Image (spheres, grey):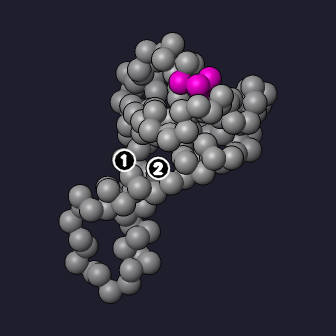
């Protein structure tokens, strides 16, 4: 549970750093609208990928950094996850996302989960036009 909460905390901290680097929008009337815009920008930033990439490099770096910065180094889950990540060269499959899901939810979760990489639908039954994964 602590590792799951750490991923959330780390991601929120990274979002706040991202927001601090951005120029404030001119329509600063509604804070909720501004936050929504920044969250969408941050998500797009994480999901950037070139056709030659096997994994999303910014997302991969974010996830690997979040695991490495986990404060409870004595955790067996942390040690297992770090050992798995160290055995895989950056940018190669399996991705950090898959390893984290496998570690947190079990091997079958990754194998049976049908997530669309483009729209994020968890129960994708058809092929997505954007990524041809479904």
Q: Residue furthest bottom?
A: 29
Q: Position of residue 52 (x, y in %)?
A: 38, 21
Residue 63, visible in the rendered structure: no
Residue 17 drawn in magenta: no
Q: Camera-side residue: 55 or 2?
A: 2
Examine the rendered structure and indicate whether residue 106 appears above or below residue 45: above
Q: Is residue 107 visible?
A: yes
Q: Where's residue 70, x and y in %?
A: 50, 40
Residue denoted by label 2: 10
Q: Quadrant of the C terminus?
A: top right
Sequence-first disc among 2 and 1 = 2
Would you identify the image quadrant in which residue 20 lies?
bottom left
Which of the two residues, 82 or 45, is positioned nearer the viewer here? 82
Q: Identify the residue at horizontal 39%, vertical 52% (top origin).
A: 14
Question: In the rendered image, which quarter is residue 35 located in?
Answer: bottom left
Q: Residues at badges 2 and 1 in contact (C-beta under 8 Å)? A: no
Residue 108 versus residue 8 in the image, above or below: above
Q: Is residue 78 above or below residue 21?
A: above
Is 131 left, or right, of 125 in this rendering?
left
Residue at the location (74% across, 44% down)?
Answer: 123
What secondary structure is marked by label 1?
A: helix
Which residues, given as a range, are shown in magenta? 78-82
Identify the element where label 2 is drawn: helix
Q: Measuring 29% from the left and 81% from the top, which residue is drawn there?
A: 28
Cα–Cα gap, marks 2 and 1: 16 Å
Q: Is residue 130 left or right of residue 102?
A: left
Image position, residue 122 (x, y; %): 70, 45
The picture quadrant where one finds residue 57 is: top left
The main secondary structure of the magenta stretch is helix
Q: Position of residue 82 (x, y in %)?
A: 53, 24
């Amino acid at each position: 549970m602590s590792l799951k909460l750490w991923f959330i905390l780390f991601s929120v901290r990274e979002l706040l750093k991202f927001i601090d680097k951005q120029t404030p929008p001119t329509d600063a009337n509604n804070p909720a609208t501004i936050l929504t815009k920044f969250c969408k920008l941050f998500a797009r930033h994480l999901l950037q990928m070139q056709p030659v990439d096997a994994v999303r490099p910014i997302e991969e770096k974010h996830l690997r950094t979040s695991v490495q910065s986990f404060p409870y180094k004595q955790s067996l889950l942390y040690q297992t996850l770090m050992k798995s990540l160290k055995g895989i060269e950056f940018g190669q499959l399996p991705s950090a996302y898959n390893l984290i899901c496998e570690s947190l939810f079990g091997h079958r979760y990754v194998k049976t989960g049908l997530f669309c990489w483009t729209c994020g639908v968890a129960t994708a039954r058809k092929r997505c036009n954007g990524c041809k994964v479904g």
